[in-house]
Image (spheres, grey):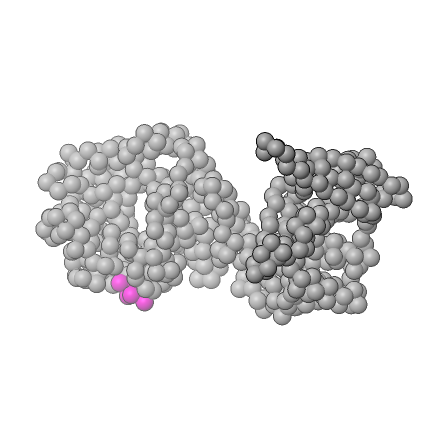
Amino acid sequence: MEQVKLYDTTLRDGMGGRGMSLSVGEKVSVVRALDALGMQFIEAGFPSSNPKEAELFERLAELKLENATIAAFGMTRRRGVAAAEDEALLSLTGAFAPVVCLVGKSSPLHVEKVIRVSREENLTMIADSIGFCRERGKRPIFDAEHFFDGYREDAEYALDCVRAAAAAGAENVTLCDTNGGSLPSFVAAATAAVVDVLDGAVDVGIHTHNDSECAVANSLAAVEAGARLVQGCVNGYGERCGNANLASILPALQLKMGFEVVSEGQLASLTPTAHYLDELCNLAPDGDRPYVGRNAFAHKAGMHAAGVAADASTFEHLDPALVGNDRDILPSELSGRATIRSQAVQAGLELDDAAAARAVERLKEREHAGFHYEAAPASFELLLRRESGAYQPLFVLESYRVVTERRAGGGVETEATIKVLLDGERYLRVAEGNGPVNALDNALRSAITERYPHLAEIELTNYKVRILDQDHGTGAVTRVILDSTDGDREWGTTGVSENIIEASWQALVDSLEYAFQPHAAKAAL
């Protein structure tokens, strides 16, 4: 198969995104992850732009990579300065990186108003800089900045810029949609013109931004037109609306367009790698990202779930395992029996037709009342257990009471009293807490952990409240979602009531009862 190479610029262009900042150690971790994924090129940034970048290049010089080549980024020489005397070029070519990526102007507007030189001088700056890098033993890539804008202004001059870079020894000429405003048909036509002009002498690359929501489409269109290197960032990081998302481009190239990019095993690591990079960048993974998002292969409508159960290709464009993702059938008021059976299988439960039908009706009733089982899969499993006959109650509630007292001086104290039956024995417990939910949790655990000590390990990690009918003010129905963990698994539970304490109690009890149920070799929810 013909190869298309990927060039990740997370550590340079990706850092232009709002809120993006990584330490040197984190940047090294990014390089390791991208190398393991199979990226052919990783752009590390400007070698001497700041102390952090200088240290990064020192660290990378000692790092052994299996797949990727490190690239340093810089610009063509300054006007009126010889390439051999340009401090930035000297620093760039003095770094260890074998590949250097030089950005130069290819738009007449930028030549005249930004760098303020003649068109002829700009061509000389491009050729001098590429030639100097080649003389210094580097593999130069030329990034033709604003190429597509320049091609609109003056196609022949934009082509002259890439000709100058190619003639001077560029290994690759990459066409940049710097403003992100181009559309796929235009990108394809302009790329085809460059491929024709260069006639195979130099490889052509593509670098797109997502300001028109077309960065991925533009990149794929350029490849169809002959480009064989794609620049971008895994997860689409970058300034403004971001760069082309390599997490979408990689599987599209390999699974849909038939190009060789990475190994099958590397492609299957795409989803965990994308999530790991989000974690390093302190970003919450976008669940709606194609291929790697948690919703990319999630099915909620009953007809879709039934179709997937019969043949996954009915509502999935590829097997999620190919990109390291998982299929998810989501419970909701839209669900049918296929969803119920899928969820039951995941929980290790057996439901006959009658039980499945009851579960569907019960689910729809509860969702209508305000429960949200998609966000609380543990509570949904308990619903299925009740319908299948596999439910084991943890205790029987006799009563609970919560008292909150605010004293003069601002002090607030909360006390909870519960009465429960465990295996026929009555327990009465009183406990204090920093609020009603905490006090109830403490009182309940003081009773149940005497018989079931493993439940003491359960921790509540998140508590979310939503008002469902805002028009009713303080009398509105409240939904509570709790997230819990035992250190190995995590799960979500829910409760709904006009009384926020009762809604919290429901979610709290579900959290403990879920942990109490037998889960033979069951994955975390």
Instruction: Tell how many labels.
Output: 0
Percent from the top left, x then y, of residue 512? 73, 44
Task: For residue 321, say whether it is visible.
Answer: no
Q: Residue at x 66, y 35 (%)?
A: 413
Q: For residue 332, what is the image quadrant? A: bottom right
Q: Residue at x 79, y 37 (%)?
A: 429
Would you place residue 407 above or below residue 262 in this image?
above
The magenta segment? 185-190
Percent from the top left, x then y, of residue 503? 68, 51
Residue 186 belongs to the span the image colors magenta: yes
Left or right of 484: which side holds 253? Answer: left
Left or right of 460: which side holds 3? Answer: left
Q: Residue at x 16, y 56 (%)?
A: 108
Out of 253 and 360, give the one closest to the viewer: 360
Out of 202 and 88, give the one closest to the viewer: 88
Percent from the top left, x then y, of residue 204? 30, 55
Out of 2 and 212, give the one closest to the viewer: 212
